[in-house]
Image (spheres, rainbow, N blue to C red):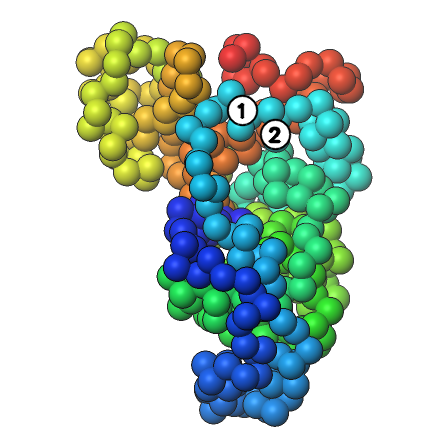
Amino acid sequence: MKLFLAALLCVGLSAHAVATDTLPAFTDNPAVIDFAHDLEQRHGFNSAELLDQFAQIRPNRRVLQLIEPPASPQQRSWERYRPRFINERRIDNGVRFWQEHLTTLVRARTFYGVPEEIIVAIIGVETEYGRNTGGFGVLEALATLAFHYPRRAEFFRTELEQFLLLARENHLDPLAVKGSFAGAIGIPQFMPGSQRRFGIDFDGDQRVDLSGSVEDAIGSVARFLEQHGWQPSQPIAVPANLPGQPDPAWIEASIRPSLPVGQLQRQGIVTAADPQAVVTLVDLVSPGKATEYWLGFENFYVITRYNRSSFYAMSVFQLAEAIRQRMTSGVAGSNDGQAVNGSTR
């Protein structure tokens, strides 16, 4: 799932700026052989069968390129980031997705307390409603990162183990499963470990299929958020007007809400939030433009558990609001997704 990628992309790969064709085949790598034997001992796999699967893949140069951050990273820019996810195409397709899967979305809200528009928006941001789920072999991608990306090797070896367990449990051919360059799978882009922990058989066919079952994808997104503390019928974020530059301590505070609204109001912040609430200050920066400030509640924080980025969480929230408004109005193509909480931002 993409919720882990923000942290991963902060880690460089300069120590491994070598062509992957100089790297040994997986089955010539002692670490891979040890890994296969370890899974045999701990989980009852057949190590010979595992090594046969590893023999059919190679370290993937493109995976290593994509996981590496750009040589000249751009400044954070909400102005650049926002239109990637909040645009006419995603709004209109989100309305269609909601209409087509209305019964399942209502059932997910009933079971888990997560609004339909939030589920729809996450799937819209992740894969544009299942249209772009990734074309990398998951086994090859995870093995490449597990054994040729040393700074995150532990994480990716764990996910590789989880993937092999997931494939066995669901009777999948590990060599046939496709996903993102980092090993995220299916319509909601869950990492294998997240699928095993939070995936749900929501269509009742006795298996969790996040690639082929929209029902399973919808139920699993809702369950993921519920398990991470979603608060039904509670707010997500509201705009905030600051009298000047924010106190650096507000920006440096945890993305987990810890700032009392009443205290912020006494220091000049103007907001419609309940003075008794606790929030995080979200700064949506764009170089050369005034920073846009919001107050994020616990549900905003929960969305960041899917992808640890305030830009990501705000994109999900604003796309959800735009889709909900379009659904309510029943007018397709009526706005560009700018209207949020009754104001044009």
Residue at 74% in and 44% down: 131
Which amino acid type corresponds to the residue marked 2 in the rendered image? Arg
Give the Cα distance between marks 1 and 2: 8 Å
Give left or right: position of 95 versus 198. Answer: right
Residue at x 62% of width, y 50% of height: 188
Does residue 150 lie above or below 343 as drawn?
A: below
Q: Amino acid at mark 1?
A: Arg
Neighbour class for label 1 at 10 Å: few (<14), some, many (≥20)?
few
Nearest to the observer: residue 32 or residue 187: 32
SS of the residue under disc 1: helix
Q: Nearer the viewer, residue 258 or 158?
A: 158
Q: Is residue 102 visible?
A: no
Count of marks placed on residues: 2
Tag 2 secondary structure: helix
Q: Which residue is mark 1?
A: 80
Position of 97 relative to 29 (above/below): above
What residue is pinned by disc 2? 84
Residue located at (48% from left, 71% from top): 147
